[in-house]
Amino acid sequence: MAQQSNIANQFGVDGIDVIPILKKDNKTYIILIKQFREPIRKWIIEFPSGYIDETDKSIEAAGIRELKEETGYTVTKVIRSTKKGQYLNPSVTSDLDAIMIVEIDGNAPINLNPKQSLDESEDVSEVIKIEYNKLLEFCDKIIEKGEIEVSTQVYTFALSSLF
Ligand SMILES: [Mg+2]
């Protein structure tokens, strides 16, 4: 049964996914979150993400806010962001998510001790910092173990490291 998105906001997208690239001590890391998702009744590793708030001034601002809430990290630079949404899973839902990739200066004082600030509805248990060149191996191990899941977005991004 197809599910119509019923979220209307000022930018015409439902949410924002953030790909956070953390640069620290000459190393490149990806920041992920482990979250419990009710529809699948499982824990899953995802990019930080969230719905747009009516107080958000732009899609980018929503992503920066969500990243801060879910991981505690402050964005240093927005590298790229889509202006409209991309369909998440168009065979079952019309949900549209924008995607942005951001850089975080992990040596900046503000990012030395990141702290989450979650609302009650959010079940983000853990912030995961993984070196980019170990991301695919990390995902494969989790999938092989089978206790928790890896989102399609994260796995697709990890596969790009093969090329
Ligand atoms: Mg979220």
Image (cartoon, rainbow, N blue to C red):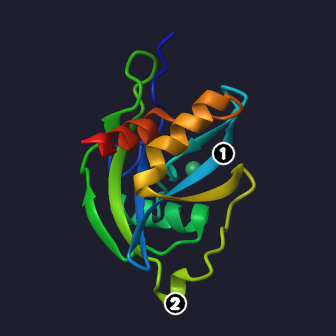
Does mark 1's beta carbon lie closer than 8 Å to ligand 1? yes
Report the residue that reaches farthest toward the bottom: 109
Percent from the top left, x then y, of residue 31? 50, 59
- Seen at 51% across and 50% down, the residue is 50
Percent from the top left, x then y, of residue 4? 45, 23
Q: Earlier in the sequence, mark 1 or mark 2?
A: 1
Does residue 63 lie above or below 84 as drawn? below
Query: Which type of secondary structure does the marked residue at label 2 adopt?
Result: helix
* Label 1 – label 2 distance at C-alpha: 27 Å
Quarter of the image with the C terminus in it: top left
Label drawn at residue 35: 1
Q: Is residue 129 visible?
A: yes
- Seen at 46% across and 84% down, the residue is 107
Does residue 126 lie above or below 111 as drawn? above
- Seen at 66% across and 45% down, the residue is 35
Left/right of residue 76 with respect to residue 42 in the rendered view: left
Q: Return the residue nearer the eye: 63 or 80.
A: 80
Q: Which residue is mark 2?
A: 109
Percent from the top left, x then y, of residue 142? 61, 37
Percent from the top left, x then y, of residue 126? 68, 56
